[in-house]
Image (tube, rainbow, N blue to C red):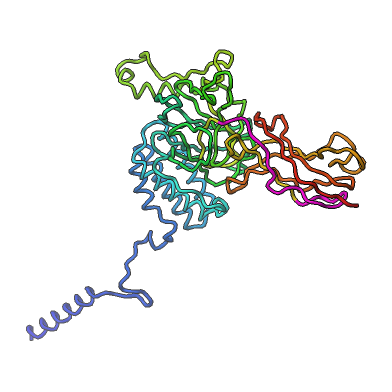
Amino acid sequence: MMKSRSGVLFAFLGGLLLWACSDQVEPGMDPGVITGPAEARVPSQCQTGDLARAARGFFSNPEQRDVVGVLRTMEVACAEGAGGTVVAGGWSILGTMESVLNAGTAGASAGGAALGNGLFDLMCDADPALCAVPPDPIVPAALGGSGIFAVRGGGTAPIVARGLVPFVDFEGDDNDALWLLTTTGASWSSATNSGGPILIYGQRTSYDELSIDEVPFEDLALELHSFPDVERFNDGQLHVGICFENDVEIPHVGLNEANPTRVERLQREGTILQTYTGLTASACATFREPFEQMAFAESALGRLLAGAAGTFVPQPLHAALVTDRRTPLSSGSPIDFSIIAPVAANPSGWLAFVDPPGSGSVGVPLPVVRVQALSGGGTPMERVAVQLYVAGNEGEPAGASFCPAGQTQGCGDVEFTVEELDGYGTLAEFANAALNKPGGYRICARALDSDGSVDFSFAEACSPMIHIKN
């Protein structure tokens, strides 16, 4: 009897054990999928595990700990649809990246680039308006020695590259340069119409498609980008400059010192930029400290002796004390971000009709007239003030002009050459040029010497005869 009860009990316990060890599957659940509690709540586009790993390779503590914490907050906020928190966290981390780069404590630049590009993705998912124009990717070189990586907003603090750029000057001598970016009184957000923070980033680049006949500085070109990609700065509100360790001698044509026909300019893609007088030679003195710190840290003496002689100091000489062949600074006024390099430009240029005037009727705007300003080497120029006028305006009827009806003087269509988005179509466009008298005329274009011009001399351009009827 006892043996029989024991057998039943063991059979019962064995069956219970088999049941307990079997897979218990709830209705509707795939038994092959095992999920953790956190992963089940966070969509894949919100997960920040890869970014946290990149952050650990780029930051050291305490920044590493803080950034990983921000990433966790961003992940939860993304899953809950709190886009504002995601965007704010992204800007916080980008600003921390700038801080450790400037402090020299950043880790692997490849990890930093991966982190930054991952932040772009998270922020753009949270606020698609940030990526109405898809941002250019951050490359590791932007986080390297001579790169630029800076978050700016309502202030006007300049941006200075972190490292010196070596180059060979016109005389074949080794030299060093430092890039700097400033705004003209306007805050960075208002200069870009971004309405909030903006990341400026870029790196030295090799670019052999400047398409210029002028003599370029060797090995000096900077590729700039922004997030969000604003495409264009408000005209005239962004300025890019270069301070040199040693003054650069600009060659004259034929090396004739009495014939100073070459002047320094910055070039963006196919366009030579105007000189901005706000960045004078003395402006380099403002950036003396970064020069000194970098050269001091790089020199053997600097590592051994505090305050040692021979630190890197630019030479901001006053114009009255130097010839026109020497310059310690380049400057320009780009309206958008692109590849920028300094050149020595021939200041003798000319105007050319791309779309010349056509015939029409009195008081009716002519077909759109487009004029291009070209440097002595044939490079399109921007920010040139161009005016249309009636040539040889004599005989019957006399006094034809572009003045509106009832106005006989003090008028004339003036437009500035402006770079198109393709970077090469630098044109002055006249869409409302209307003549006020019938007759046959030749229309000419001339460059004005004004605040908007570039101090180049341009030969005028004149159209074939056109006819204006009543």
* Residue 231 percent location from the top left of the image: 58, 46
Report the number of numbered marks.
Answer: 0
| Residue 12 quadrant | bottom left
Compared across the picture, whether 68 is left or right of 8 comes to right
Compared across the picture, whether 296 is left or right of 132 comes to left
* Residue 283 percent location from the top left of the image: 55, 22
Compared across the picture, whether 261 is left or right of 75 comes to right
* Residue 287 percent location from the top left of the image: 49, 23
Of the 4 image quadrants, the one containing the N terminus is: bottom left
Rendered residue at 31%/17% (across/down): 301
* Residue 271 percent location from the top left of the image: 58, 39
Compared across the picture, whether 34 is left or right of 132 comes to left
Q: Of 125 and 334, which appears nearest the observer?
A: 334
Q: Of 29 and 270, which appears nearest the observer?
A: 270
Would you say residue 302 is visible in this rendering? yes
Does residue 26 sit above or below 413 in this rendering? below
Does residue 388 sit above or below 314 in this rendering? below
Residue 351 drawn in magenta:
yes
Rendered residue at 80%/39% (across/down): 389
Would you say residue 154 is visible in this rendering? no
Residue 310 drawn in magenta:
no
Rendered residue at 35%/23% (across/down): 297
Q: Of 108 and 354, which appears nearest the observer?
A: 354
Does residue 44 sit above or below 374 in this rendering? below
* Magenta highlight range: 345-367
Rendered residue at 88%/38% (across/down): 394
